[in-house]
């Protein structure tokens, strides 16, 4: 590859200025041969020549400014906001698939599964009441955990939990070979009922799509054994908030650890903040690491400019 320093790659985003600048620095430090820059630094001819852009929550008008884009490299793993925009039919979307992100998510899943497994929310409440009460202890191999979504993140999470001893089952859209996963796997609508009915802790790691929006409503939550708990590390609208509150209030669900919400930041007066059955996290389960993400972006850009390879793209009709 020669003279990549003369190849400008626009970076489109809805980030605040401070974050945008941090990303620009990280990307340019890593993608040595390229100049990743604000679209304003491109001439009219360069905007027309641009075939690829790096994006993080870009607006439709920012994308329209680059009429001949072939693909965009997202800095995020979840791309529902981008995919839900009016995108040119020929524009391909590459999302971030980062091993470090999967490991970060696996650690988060382990931490919060253990939090539920060892009854920490209950002991916290007992302490507030100065109540000394011991509850029976189960071992990990006596606890069943479901991972909904067995993609880049879900598979790593499932493996980490299984290594710790939990009885882990996975669920996704399509059938998978047991050899691939070495654990019990369920799929489709029927499979969801089956897996929920035998799971004491459920972790959601699904993309937000037309099919998964509101997926866990009143009926699906009722399939869970009484006293089960939920962890949502994917996207808020996958759970129906009203149904979740009703399940917690009736005692059907014991606890929910929520990292993601329909509106973020979670509004100040939202019922979740003070509900004793809910742990609120500020979308922190697996933040994108600028250094490792920049390396992936650099490698993807190099592949494209050296031999025209576009990394695996998402299906815009499927939504992930
Ligand atoms: P991925 O690799 O695309 O995997 C998605 C998984 O979900 C696949 O197993 C897929 O099934 C399954 N799925 C999709 N639609 C389904 C449906 N209708 N029914 C059943 N299964 C369905 O995604 P990923 O990289 O693991 O990321 C998952 C999500 O995590 C992202 O979309 C993002 O929203 C979220 N996320 C959150 C954070 C955080 O900090 N909280 C950080 C990063 C990402 P198949 O395998 O059969 O296709």
Image (cartoon, rainbow, N blue to C red):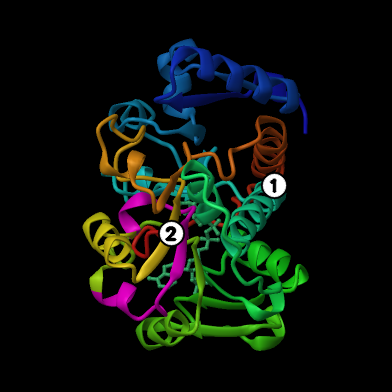
Let me know if residue 98 is in the magenta part: no
Q: Residue 104's x, y, as percent?
A: 67, 47
Does 233 sit left or right of 182 as displayed? Answer: left
- On screen, 183 above or below 261? below
Q: 281 or 313, which is in the foreground? A: 281
Question: Do we see residue 281 in this rendering?
Answer: yes
Residue located 37% across and 43% down the image: 82
Residue matched to label 2: 255
Residue 172 in the image: above or below residue 32: below
Q: Is mark 2 within 8 Å of ligand 1?
A: no
User: What element does badge 1 sit on?
Assistant: helix
N-terminal of the pair, mark 1 or mark 2, is: 2
The residue mark sitting in front, 1 or 2, is 2
What secondary structure is found at the residue carrying circle 2? strand
Tell which of 44 and 133 is nearer to you: 133
* Res 90 seen here: no
Which residue is at a point 48% across and 80% down the rendered structure image?
A: 174
Residue that mark 1 sits on:
307
Magenta-highlighted residues? 219-238
Up/down of 186 relative to 44, above or below? below
- Provide residue 65's location: percent of width, then percent of height: 34, 25
Give the alpha-carbon distance from disc 1 to disc 2, as whole Å.
51 Å
Picture quadrant of residue 319: bottom left
Residue drawn at 56 percent across, 69 percent down: 150
- The quadrant in which the C terminus is found is bottom left
């Amino acid at each position: 590859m020669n003279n990549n320093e003369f190849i400008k790659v626009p970076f489109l985003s809805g980030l605040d200025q401070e974050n945008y600048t941090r990303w620009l620095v990280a990307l340019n430090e890593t993608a040595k041969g390229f100049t990743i820059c604000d679209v304003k630094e491109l001439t009219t001819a360069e905007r027309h020549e641009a075939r690829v852009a790096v994006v993080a929550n870009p607006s439709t008008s920012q994308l329209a400014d680059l009429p001949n884009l072939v693909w965009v490299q997202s800095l995020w793993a979840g791309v529902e906001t981008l995919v839900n925009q009016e995108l040119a039919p020929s524009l391909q979307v590459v999302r971030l698939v980062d091993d470090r992100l999967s490991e970060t998510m696996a650690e988060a899943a382990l931490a919060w599964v253990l939090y539920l497994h060892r009854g920490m929310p209950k002991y916290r409440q007992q302490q507030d009441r100065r109540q000394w009460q011991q509850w029976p202890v189960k071992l990990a191999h006596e606890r069943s955990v479901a991972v909904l979504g067995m993609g880049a993140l879900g598979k790593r999470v499932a493996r980490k939990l299984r290594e710790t001893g939990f009885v882990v089952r996975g669920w996704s859209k399509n059938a998978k070979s047991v050899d691939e996963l070495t654990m019990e796997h369920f799929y489709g609508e029927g499979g969801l009922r089956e897996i929920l009915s035998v799971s004491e802790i459920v972790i959601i790691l699904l993309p937000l799509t037309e099919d998964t929006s509101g997926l866990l409503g009143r009926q699906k939550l009722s399939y869970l054994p009484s006293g089960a708990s939920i962890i949502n590390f994917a996207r808020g609208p996958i759970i129906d908030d009203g149904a979740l509150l009703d399940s917690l209030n009736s005692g059907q669900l014991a606890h929910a650890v929520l990292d993601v919400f329909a509106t973020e930041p979670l509004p100040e007066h939202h019922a979740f903040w003070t509900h004793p059955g809910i742990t609120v996290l500020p979308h922190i389960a697996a933040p994108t690491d600028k250094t490792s993400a920049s390396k992936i972006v650099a490698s993807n850009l190099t592949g494209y400019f050296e031999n025209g390879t576009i990394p695996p793209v998402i299906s815009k009709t499927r939504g992930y």
